[in-house]
Amino acid sequence: MKIASVKMIAAAATLVGLSGLAITAGPARAANPAGTQAHTVTSGAVPTDLSPRDLSTLPLANSHLTERERANLAVVLAQYHAAEGNSMDVPTFVENFAGDGVFTDVVAGQTYKGNTLGDVLYKMHHLFPDVHRDLKRITVSGDVISIELSIQGTFSGTLETPAGTVQPNGAKIDVPTADFWYLKDGKIEKFNCYVGYSDLWTQLGINIDWASAVAKG
């Protein structure tokens, strides 16, 4: 595939806002790496609590959670389900944020709030209709939930960039990502997502043209 400059890659990350691509859990459609297990959420409704059986299926760093922590985790898991390729539910995703809640794609430098909170989900679903998040490790500490995951899917939609349109090639992605959720009174006040864009571009077959970047100073 045509080589892209560093500047174009950065601009594409801003346009795509792929962190929104990383917001849900459900049946995996992209191939999972050997030895890993996809962790799924099967209901779009936000449960008020999680049972011991529910917790036993999750990759929790700390299994002894308070009632408030379990309720917070239930809200976050519902967000992953609402962003899943085969069960996307943008209204629910937006409603789980506080009125002044903010979603930041940190690496791309993009911030979403209000009615724009669901924009990234639409972009992600366009690029990867079968998008899925494999939750690898979940740490719950009061009103803060940290999750190590990978975003998986098949590159099936066109990617618009400042240099033109990148056509889909059916590439399977498995992109390392870190999500940090901050809640208050059962609502999400802040969601910071860190997507491994360098890995993403490589998996899509888009290569950085370092020589061109150096030549331009």
Image (cartoon, rainbow, N blue to C red):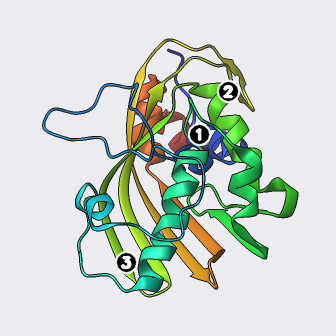
- Up/down of 57 relative to 50, above or below: above
Q: Earlier in the sequence, mark 3 or mark 2?
A: 2
| Residue 1 x/y as whole percent | 50, 14
- Which class describes the residues within 10 Å of circle 2: few (<14), some (14-19), or many (20+)? some
Q: Earlier in the sequence, mark 3 or mark 1?
A: 1
Residue 181, percent from left and from top: 53, 72
Residue shown at the point (68%, 48%) measured from the top left? 14
Q: Residue 143: x percent and y percent?
A: 50, 84
The alpha-carbon separation of the residues under discs 3 and 2 comes to 31 Å
Question: Residue type at mark 1?
Answer: Ile
Which residue is more in the foreground, 73 or 125?
73
Label at residue 9: 1
Element at label 1: helix
Where is mark 2, residue-wise? 126
10 Å crowding of disc 3: few (<14), some (14-19), many (20+)? many
Q: Residue at x 51, y 44 (%)?
A: 214
Residue at left offset 54%, top offset 34%? 212
Task: Identify which residue, 101 or 197, lies in the foreground.
Answer: 101
The answer to the question of whether label 3 and label 2 lie on touching residues, with beta carbons closer than 8 A, is: no
Q: Amino acid at mark 3?
A: Val
